[in-house]
Structures are given as structure tokens and as C-alpha cells.
Amino acid sequence: MTHPSFDCTGVIPACLLPFQADLSIDMENYRKHITDIAEVRGISAITVNGHASEVSSCTFDEQQKLLEAACDQVGDRVRIVTGIYADSTAEAVRLARMADTSGASALLVFPPNVFAMGSRPEMVLAHFSAIADATSLPLIVFQFPVREAMSYGHDTLGMLVDSIPSIRAMKDGSGDPVRSEMAVRDYQSDKFSVLSTHSAWLMQSLVLGCKGVLSGAGSTVAELQVKLFEAVQNHDLETAQAVSARLYSTTKAFYRSPSVDMHNRMKEAQVLLGRLPSAAVRPPLQKLPDEEIALIGQLMKDAGIVG
């Protein structure tokens, strides 16, 4: 399948995944949610089958249906990035081939969970090389927090960028401003972009020079992310500070301990804003307590986000 070229830059929200009461996929409201995001002026793509859409709980067939539905619903307006979330290289290759024929414009490659026990650079290179050999789609490296073993070392990242031309970007979740700046200064070019997912300090990360944002918070606050990104690009400090102040309330709403609930909180915000009918999540995730849901609602109002 021929895909229009995508440079993997700009504001790329990651969508949520609504479920029915029986925890089957609510495809009608998934399509509505995708459409809501696509209508935000200034985004460059939407990510599906990522952490925000609870990809770890979705089967291969479900992931294919979600990707195809997104491409069918909004693919004529925005690019669709899809996650490659797999425990083995063989399954990652299978997902990549499926994505290539289903309409994706780029692949967000998660580290295999086995890397939680550590990895060697040659393992990382072999994994990405196999995916690159299976598809001509551009690849986005998902960089995990440096405190986690699944994070790639700075030299390993450089090796990937140098060795695999189809690697066009990195979703930088390093959680470390020093490592973020190193990635921007040492590796960013006209062929490779650093995308911030540091929603808790988004303005600071964009000022470093990141060429975009790829974040689950975009499911709910994409408009503010676009405004902040454009203000930084235009060197408009006053506007950037004002938008960042509004985003601070959403940071307090979404990014608290435990972090496993961050997208759960975004779903609850969607319900409070009247955008989704249910915040159901698949176990082991569980519904949030009433007091936390109420706090999310108040923080959405503080940010000036209303239904």
C-alpha cells in the first residue's frame, strides 16, 4: 500500500478507547472520539493502539479493527500513527505488516516488555531492524523514563538513528531534562525529530527545540497543546506562559501517583466534559474513587475546559 510521506512532526494526540459495560469496544463512541480530536485545528496526526487506548488489553484483531476504523473515519484529514506493542520481535513484525496494509502513516514502536530485565544494544538494533525490513513506514522510537530498564541509552539511540533510515522520530518520555536536551542537540535533524511526551513540563521541553508533541493528554487537551506548540515556535513567550498556566491544572488532574491511572483520569475527564458516555476500563485497571473524579472535574474548570 502506498502511503503519503509523513515527517513525524507536529502535535500528535494519542486517543483513548471507550468500552461498553461488558468491556467490549464501543466502536460508535471510539469513532466519535477520533472525530473530536481530528477536528482540533493544527494537529498533524492521531495515535491509536498506544498506552492511552489500553493497547495491552487489546487483541491483534481488536488493534487491526481500531486502526482501520480510525483510518476510515478521519484518515482523509489527518495521518494515523499506530502503536507496535509486542513482547516478541516476530509479533512486532506481524503488527507492522498489518499496519502497513491497513492505512497507517507511521509506527510508534514500544520496547518489548522483556527489556524490563535489561537489554544489550544489539538486541535493540535487531528488533528495530526486523520491523524496518517488514515495512517502508516511518518508525517512531518510544523512549521510556531513564529510571526504567526499558529506556534506551543515549548511545543506543544514536546507533538506531544512524543505522535505520526509516526511524524518523522519538517519543521522548525520558523524564530527564538533561537527556532530553542531549537528544535534541545530538540527534535532531531534518531527518529525525524529538517529540515531547513530557506533559507535566511541556513548555520547558518544547523550548528545548522539540519538533512536536506525542501525548495521551492530547486526547483531552489537544487544543491547548497546539496553542502552546505554536506559541513556542513563534517565540511568543507571553502566550506560551498563559497556555502553560492552563495546562498546569490538567497536569495536576492527570499526572499524579499512581501513574498507571493517567489515562483512566483522562477518560473520567471525557465523561465529565460530556464527550464520552462511560469511563469503563479493562482490568487490571479499576474505576477511580468518587473523590478523585470530583477533583478532576474541578481541575478541568480551573483550566478553562468545559463541556
Image (tube, rainbow, N blue to C red):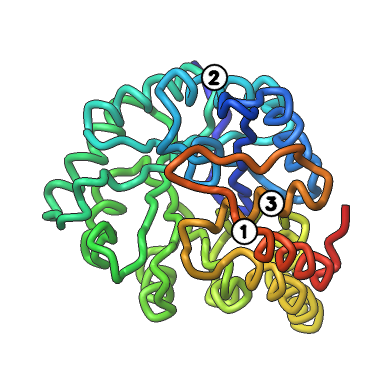
Q: CA distance from mark 1 to mark 2?
A: 31 Å
Question: Is residue 176 toward the left or the right of residue 203 in the image?
Answer: left
Q: Residue furthest front?
A: 290
- Name the foreground residue: 110 vs 75: 110
* Residue at the spot of label 1: 289
Question: Is residue 34 toward the left or the right of residue 58 in the image?
Answer: right
Amino acid of disc 3:
Glu
- Name the foreground residue: 3 vs 140: 140
- When the figure is inspected, residue 152 is found, relative to residue 191, above or below; the finding is below
The answer to which image quadrant residue 186 occupies is bottom left
Q: Where residue 244 sits in the image (x, y, percent)?
A: 71, 76
Q: Where residue 124 sits in the image (x, y, percent)?
A: 20, 48
Give the structural element (helix, strand or loop) at label 2. Answer: helix
* Residue at the spot of label 2: 65
Residue drawn 27% across the image and 27% down it: 91
- Name the foreground residue: 215 vs 11: 215
- Please report contact status of discs 1 and 2: CB closer than 8 Å, yes or no: no
Q: CA distance from mark 2 to mark 3?
A: 24 Å
| Circle 2 residues within 10 Å: few <14, some 14–19, many ≥20 | some
- When the figure is inspected, residue 248 is found, relative to residue 194, above or below; the finding is below
| Circle 3 residues within 10 Å: few <14, some 14–19, many ≥20 | many
| Circle 1 residues within 10 Å: few <14, some 14–19, many ≥20 | few
Give the structural element (helix, strand or loop) at label 3. Answer: helix
Amino acid of disc 1:
Pro
Q: Earlier in the sequence, mark 1 or mark 2?
A: 2
Amino acid of disc 2:
Lys
Q: Earlier in the sequence, mark 1 or mark 3?
A: 3
- Please report contact status of discs 1 and 3: CB closer than 8 Å, yes or no: no
Give the structural element (helix, strand or loop) at label 1. Answer: loop
* Residue at the spot of label 3: 268
Residue drawn 37% across the image and 42% down it: 109
